[in-house]
Amino acid sequence: MIFTPTPGESMGKLNQVLAKEQRIKKDHKDANDNIYKALQKSALFDGQIKTYNTSLESSEGAAEIVPNVHQKVQMDVQRLLGLVAQVTGDFWDITLTKDVANTVAFADVIIDDEVLVERVPATFLLWMDKQLIDVHTEVSKIPTLDPAERWEWDEAQGNWRSDAVRSLRTKKINKPIVLYEATDKHPAQVQMVTEDVTTGTWDTMKLSGALPVPQKEDLVRRVSKLRQAILDARERANMTEAANQKIGDKLFGYLFANVTSQDLP
């Protein structure tokens, strides 16, 4: 569902205004960068006309001919301010047009033909899309239960538990081994060896706060689905008609009113 603004001179759909804004924004930046650089070079605004007048009398010989000097003014403050008023005024106009249109650009968030949220502003939809990128990153990192184990939910502990697995506990002991029995001539030869002896058993039950794989996959799918619904809603909201707004001429008419009595070029 799309809500359109009050009737007025239209600049087209809001998405067209947004595209146009990017071009005007770039033109504004480029022009103002050049203007700022020019204003730092005061010599560009200076010029002169030098006319040579000879002081020699004609009786003293031929007069020396010296060419006149004409240094043109390369930059003119009035014209630069006119350019500022033009490019900045256009930028302000398009920005106000966008902001006013955003106050009446709404759309419903719809998933599976069901309206999940009604009349969401276009600016919030843009913000929400960026938030969901972070949410998607987080849920994609969720650990999952080891599929090699059989898990059951333990209400008492509030987490998952696996079946208990029994294993042996062993202990190393030193045990003498007789290599050669004693004789009437030689004593017995004995060597100490290490032997593993079972001392008991372990019953191990694994616990986990992770999610089953299907639940994680469903969660990731839901985040992706909601993000797509947000993107679709943005597209619908951006189809709102944008009424043209003009403030640049009035504001710069006030700002530059005392520069010259003439109209800025």
Image (tube, rainbow, N blue to C red):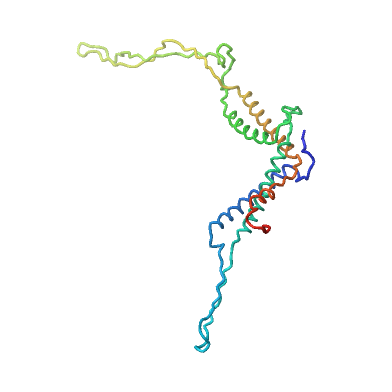
Tell me which residue sits at (49%, 12%) in the image: 203
Q: In this view, does 142 lie above or below 29?
A: above
Point out the image quarter for the N terminus: top right
Residue 36: image quadrant is bottom right
Q: Residue furthest bottom?
A: 59
Tell me which residue sits at (62%, 34%) in the image: 133
Front residue of 13/191: it is: 13
Q: Residue 242 at what x, y percent from top left?
A: 74, 42
Residue 196: image quadrant is top left
Q: Residue 31 at what x, y percent from top left?
A: 61, 54
Point out the image quarter for the C terminus: bottom right
| Number of marks drawn | 0
Front residue of 85/200: it is: 85
Front residue of 105/183: it is: 105
Tell me which residue sits at (58%, 13%) in the image: 154
The answer to whether 194 appears left or right of 125 in the picture is: left
